[in-house]
Amino acid sequence: MAEGTWYAGDIDRVIVTEEQIRAKTDELAKQVAADHADADSLLLVGVLKGALMFMADFARALGRYGPPVELEFMAVSSYGQGSSSSGVVRILKDLDRDITGRRVIVVEDIVDSGLTLSWLLKYLAGRGAASIEVVTLLRKPDAVRVPLDVRYVGFDIPTEFVVGYGLDYAERYRELSDVAVLKPAVYQR
Ligand code: XMP
Ligand code: MG
């Protein structure tokens, strides 16, 4: 987190740097490309808004190694006003296209309780995809309690609320290049 940037005073510590994200994204894309070397194309389904940055960088990394990709987005809401997942998911934006027979890769920013993803995977399975896999940049320890097949994981991080690189607190901090933990004072404002 560069000194003097707008939010520098709000940051307690950076837990994943821009450079680490770049290297990991490249590595994940290489793996996905190798696993799908026989595919005509992959359909990436980004989960808005958090996965916005990762989706863009992951798609470009696949562009270096992989089969052609097509980009789709969904927006779901699981948190409502609170800060822990309820498992009650609302679709705010659905897929624009039929995914029947497609190889789908769901692109997530973070898997926390796994409830959102678990719901999303069932939903996508019901729409006839040929295969559905998940790539997530971040995963928290609670995620292991849900029987979820998250095939590609960037970083396992502690159970702390993080922001940056697409992740927000009250819609702020998404534009930060690193993933960071906020100072407690920010939540008390
Ligand atoms: P679950 O618990 O269903 O939650 O796996 C997944 C979604 O919750 C959000 N989430 C976070 N957002 N910082 C954020 O900005 C976090 O530390 C965090 N943990 C969970 C996120 O939208 C994710 O898709
Ligand atoms: Mg959020």
Image (cartoon, grey):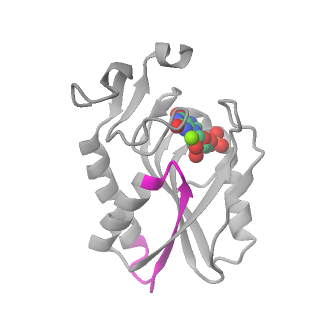
Q: Is residue 37 magenta?
A: yes
The image shows residue 108, relative to residue 20, as above or below, that is: below
Looking at the rendered structure, the number of numbered marks drawn on it comes to 0
Q: Quick one: quadrant of the N terminus?
A: top left
Which residue extends farthest left?
Answer: 3
Start-end of magenta stretch:
34-52
- Among the 4 quarters of the image, the one containing residue 94: bottom right
Please provide percent x and percent y for residue 121: 67, 60
Please provide percent x and percent y for residue 188: 55, 14
- Among the 4 quarters of the image, the one containing residue 9: top left
Q: Is residue 77 magenta?
A: no
At 68% from the left and 39% from the top, the residue drawn is: 79
| The quarter of the picture showing ligand 2 | top right
At 38% from the left and 66% from the top, the residue drawn is: 59
| Camera-nearest residue between 167 and 15 | 167
At 62% from the left and 84% from the top, the residue drawn is: 101
Please provide percent x and percent y for residue 14: 33, 28
| Camera-nearest residue between 166 and 152 | 166
